[in-house]
Image: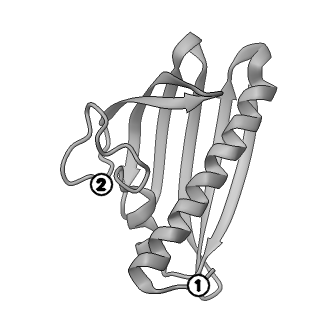
């Protein structure tokens, strides 16, 4: 097992960041089988996706184990094709005049952990860039 901790700061209040971070549409999974309307994550929700990995679309299942809006904590248990698993704990906290999003990812891909780790870092960097674009489009923020 390998653990990654990824943090990004955003120039918005925690509640606004939480809304984007837990919005399935913002994560690109709103059309996934199991996604509900509204697209805000819900404890117990199961999402079945096809995620691109090395040019191939791979099956991926996300179970929303916890979505605590009051504490701004999201926990997921995820499983990809081939039995690769990971657990995500996402938390939003105040930071200076904005907020910080911390993602703790526990990877369990056996001997493929180093490759999964590289892919996960790239994946979460893309999510960060997407969040910045959403905030910029909604609020006129500059990077």
Given the current orientation, which residue lies at the most extreme left position? Answer: 37
Q: Is residue 71 visible?
A: no
Q: Quadrant of the C terminus?
A: bottom right
Work out how far the residue at label 1 is from the one at label 2, CA to CA, in angstroms: 25 Å
Q: Residue at x 42, y 32 (%)?
A: 62
Q: Mark 2 or mark 1, which is nearer the start of the sequence? A: 2
Q: Residue at x 71, y 45 (%)?
A: 121
Picture disc at residue 18: none
The residue indicated by pointer 2 is 40
- How crowded pointer 2 is (Cα within 10 Å; few <14, some 14-19, many 20+) is rated as some
Q: Quadrant of the N terminus?
A: top right
Q: Residue at x 54, y 52 (%)?
A: 90
- Is 142 placed above or below 41 here? below
Quick one: SS at disc 2? loop
How far from the left and from the top, in percent, is residue 92? 53, 65
- Is 118 placed above or below 82 here? below
How far from the left and from the top, in percent, is residue 136? 49, 78
Residue 38 found in image quarter: bottom left
Q: Nearer the viewer, residue 38 or 103?
A: 38
Q: Residue at x 25, y 33 (%)?
A: 34
The residue indicated by pointer 1 is 142
Given the current orientation, which residue lies at the most extreme top position? Answer: 82
How far from the left and from the top, in percent, is residue 109? 69, 19
How far from the left and from the top, in percent, is residue 50? 44, 28
Quick one: SS at disc 1? loop
Residue 107 found in image quarter: top right
């Amino acid at each position: 097992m390998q653990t990654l901790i990824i943090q990004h700061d955003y120039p918005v209040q925690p509640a606004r960041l939480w809304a984007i971070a837990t919005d399935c549409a913002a994560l690109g999974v709103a059309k996934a089988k199991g996604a509900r309307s509204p697209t805000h994550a819900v404890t117990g929700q199961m999402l079945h996706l096809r995620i691109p990995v090395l040019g191939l679309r791979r099956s991926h299942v996300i179970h929303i184990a916890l979505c605590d809006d009051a504490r701004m904590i999201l926990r997921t248990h995820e499983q990809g094709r081939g039995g690769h698993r990971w657990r995500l704990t996402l938390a939003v906290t105040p930071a200076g005049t904005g907020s910080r999003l911390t993602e703790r990812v526990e990877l369990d891909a056996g001997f493929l952990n180093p490759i999964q780790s590289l892919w996960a870092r790239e994946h979460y960097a893309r999510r960060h860039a997407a969040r910045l674009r959403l905030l910029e489009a909604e609020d006129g923020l500059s990077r």
